[in-house]
Amino acid sequence: MSFAKRSLRGPQHDDDRLRDLGYKPVLTRRMSGFGNAAISFSVISVLSGCMTMYGFGLVTGGPAVMLWGWVIVGFMVLFVGAGLAEVTSAYPTSGALYFMADRLGGKKAGWCTGWLNLLGLLGAIAGIDYGAAAFTGAFLNLQFGLTPTPQKTIVIFLVILALHAVLNLFGVRLVSVLNSVSVWWHLAGVAVIVTALTIVPSHHQSARFVFTTFVNDTGWSAHWYVVLIGLLLAQYTFSGYDASAHLSEETTNASVAAPRGIMRAITWSWAAGFVLLVGLTFAIRDYAGVQGTSTGVPPAQIFLDALGPAGAKALLLVVIIAQLFCGNAETAACSRMVFAFSRDGALPGSHLWRKVDARNGTPRAAVWLSVTVAACLALPSLYSPTAYNAVVAINVIGITPAYAIPIYLRIRNRDSFAPGPWNLGRWGVPVGVVAVAWVAFVTVLFCLPQTRPESGGWVSVDTFNYAPVALVAVLALATVWWRIAGRDYEIPAVAADAEMAKIQDGVV
C-alpha cells in the first residue's frame, strides 16, 4: 500500500508515519492546519521584515525596486516553497530540512544542512527581536523622549527574548493560539496602517513616484547592480516558512497540513506585503527626512509626518506587537530544530537539549538554548552598528541555501523519491530546478557589497557585507564539529531505509 493512501486514514497515522521514519512520538499534536500555516506566516511577518528593511529599500533602488522586486521575488519564492513543501510531505519531522537531506543525500548532507538551518534560525531570532527592540525604542522616544542608545536597545532586546522564552515554555497549544491570533493581527494591522495612511494625510505621492522612482544612494554607479541588491528587502522578508515543517510533529495530518502551511504562508505574505509597501510609499512626505530620521526607524518617520505623534505611536504599537508575534513563532521553530538535531546527537550537550517536558510536551531546554545563543549573537551591536548586519547575514546566508539542498537532492533522486500525499506530480522536477537556481542566485546576491564607501574604493569596515564571512564560519563550524562528534550523529534509519528498499524493488 502506498504512503499516499495510508496518509488519509486520520490523525493517528501521523504518529505511525513518524515511527516509519524511525522516531518515537514524544511531542504533543495539538496544532491544526491553520495553526501550522499561521506559524510560518508569523515568522515571515511582513510587519517585521518589510518594516525593518524599508530603510534599506529606500537606498537600494527606492520605490520602484521595492515594489516590483517584491512582486518578482514573491513569485520566485513560490517555486522554492512548492519544492520544499513536496519534500516536507514525504518527511514530516521536526528535523525538517536536515532530515530530508539525510534521507535523500546521506549523513554529511544532513549534517551540513542542519548546521546551516540551525544557525539561520538562531540568527533569525536575534534579527527579529533586535528589530522589535529598535521599533520599541522608537516608540519610547516618541512617548517619553527616551534616546534609543545601543545599550538601551540591547536591554529591550533581552527583555523581549525572555518574554518569548517564557511564552514558549507553556506548550504548543499556547504557541498555536498566539500564531492564529498573529495571522489576524498582521492582516488587520496591514489594513489599519494602509487605511490610515490613505485617509488621514492630505498629501500623497503620485502613482508615478510610487511605481517608477528609482533611487541609488549606495555609492555604486551601475544601476543594474543596485536593482539586484535591492531585491534583498523582499528576499530577507520571505524566509522562515520552514517553520511549518519544524512543527510538523505537533500538527495533525502533518503530511498535508505542513506543506499547505508553507504555501499558504507565502501566498498570504506576498499579497499583504505588497499592499503594505504601496501604502507606506504613497505616504512619504520628505524622502530625505525619512532616510535620516532621528527615530532610527524610517517607517516611524512616515507615520509621524502623515499622522502626527499620536497616530504614529498607535501604528508603531501595531507593528511592535506583530514583531513580537513573529519572534515568538521563530523561537518555537528554532527550539524544535534544536530538539530534533539533539535527538540525533548532532549538538554539543545533545543529551540536555533533547529533553521534553512530561506535562506539556515542550522541549524546554531547547527553548532556553535558542534564546541564549540569539542573545549572544546580537551583543556585539553594543560596540559596532555593523554588527547587526552580521546577525542578518547569519540568518539569510544560513537558512536560504538550506532550503535548496533537500530540493536539489529530491531532483537528483527523482527515480527513488517517494512523494507524500501533497506533491507536484510531473511538475516536481521542473519546479525544483527553478527553485534551486533561484536560491543559488540570491545566495550570491547576499554576498555582494551593498554600499560603497563615500571616499571611493571597494569596501570599508562600515560597508563590508558579512554574509560571506557568516557562510564560511558556519561551514567551518560544521566541519570541525563533524570531525569531533560526527560519529555520534545517527538519524534513525531502519524503518525508513526498509521502505526505500521496497520502493526501489517495486514493492510499494
Image (tube, rainbow, N blue to C red):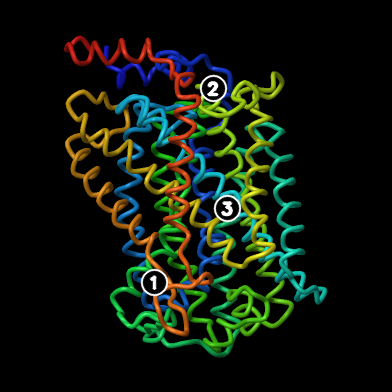
Q: Which residue is mark 2?
A: 343
The location of residue 441, given as percent across then percent down, is 29, 56
Residue holding disc 1: 67
Q: Nearer the viewer, residue 171 or 327?
A: 327
Could you say whether the residue bearing mark 2 is in a helix, strand or loop? helix
Quarter of the view holding residue 349: top right
* Label 3, label 1: how far apart the Cα atoms are: 23 Å
Image position of 456 (left or right of 124): left
CA separation in Å, label 2 and label 3? 34 Å
Whether 2 is drawn above or below 222: the answer is: above
Q: Which mark is residue 184?
A: 3
Q: Are marks 2 and 3 in contact (CB under 8 Å)?
A: no
Q: Secondary structure at mark 1?
A: helix
Neighbours of disc 3 within 10 Å: few (<14), some (14-19), many (20+):
few
- Mark closer to the chain start, 2 or 1: 1
Three-letter code for the amino acid on which mark 2 is drawn: Arg
Q: Is residue 94 above or below residue 351?
A: below
